[in-house]
Image (cartoon, rainbow, N blue to C red):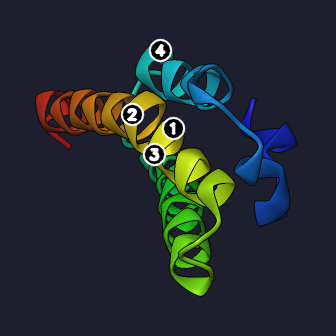
């Protein structure tokens, strides 16, 4: 699945939770073993970086023009609809990694 993971942040800026959720689900479903840990961690890192990038860019846009209600609404929509679910999914991945014993 991560072979098709976008590399341009602009793609992520239009994503909702359902788009990110597919990649979290892929990581949750994959087995962690000594032979797969490197690629699993690499993919998790790429996903986490994408979420962080979107968060930061949405925040910055709200500070560039504080009178733009659309920018603020987009930022708050991300905070309400994507970010909490991403944090919860990220926690599940942390627990999965710890449970693997690797």
Q: Nearer the viewer, mark 2 or mark 4?
A: 2
Label 2 close to label 1 by CB (< 8 Å): yes
Label 3 close to label 1 by CB (< 8 Å): yes
Q: Callout 1: 10 Å neighbours few (<14), some, many (20+)? A: some
Q: Position of residue 92 (x, y in %)?
A: 24, 27
Q: Which residue is mark 1?
A: 77
Residue lying farthest to the bottom in this orientation: 64
Q: CA distance from mark 1 to mark 4?
A: 28 Å
Label 3 close to label 2 by CB (< 8 Å): yes
- Looking at the image, can residue 15 be seen? yes
Lower position in the chain sequence, tag 3 or tag 4:
4
Q: Callout 2: 10 Å neighbours few (<14), some, many (20+)? A: few
Q: Nearer the viewer, mark 3 or mark 4?
A: 3
Q: CA distance from mark 2 to mark 1?
A: 5 Å
Q: CA distance from mark 3 to mark 4?
A: 30 Å
Q: CA distance from mark 3 to mark 1?
A: 4 Å
Answer left or right for 83 relative to 35: left
**Element under label 3?**
helix
Q: Position of residue 61 (x, y in %)?
A: 62, 74
Q: Position of residue 26 (x, y in %)?
A: 57, 22
Q: Quadrant of residue 72?
A: bottom right
Q: CA distance from mark 3 to mark 2?
A: 6 Å
Q: CA distance from mark 2 to mark 4?
A: 25 Å
Lower position in the chain sequence, tag 2 or tag 4:
4
> Does 75 appear above or below 49?
above
Q: Which residue is mark 4?
A: 29
User: Which residue is found at the position 65% from the left and 65% from the top?
Assistant: 68
Q: Which residue is mark 3?
A: 76
Answer left or right for 100 relative to 27: left
Q: Which residue is mark 2?
A: 80
Q: Nearer the viewer, residue 5 or 53?
A: 53
Q: Nearer the viewer, mark 1 or mark 4?
A: 1
């Amino acid at each position: 699945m991560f072979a098709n993971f976008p590399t341009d942040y602009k793609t992520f800026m239009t994503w909702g939770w359902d788009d990110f959720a597919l990649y979290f689900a892929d990581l949750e479903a994959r087995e962690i073993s000594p032979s797969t840990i490197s690629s699993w961690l690499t993919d998790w890192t790429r996903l986490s970086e994408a979420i962080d990038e979107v968060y930061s860019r949405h925040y910055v846009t709200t500070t560039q023009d504080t009178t733009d209600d659309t920018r603020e609404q987009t930022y708050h929509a991300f905070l309400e609809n994507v970010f909490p679910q991403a944090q919860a999914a990220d926690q599940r991945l942390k627990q999965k990694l710890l449970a693997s014993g690797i």
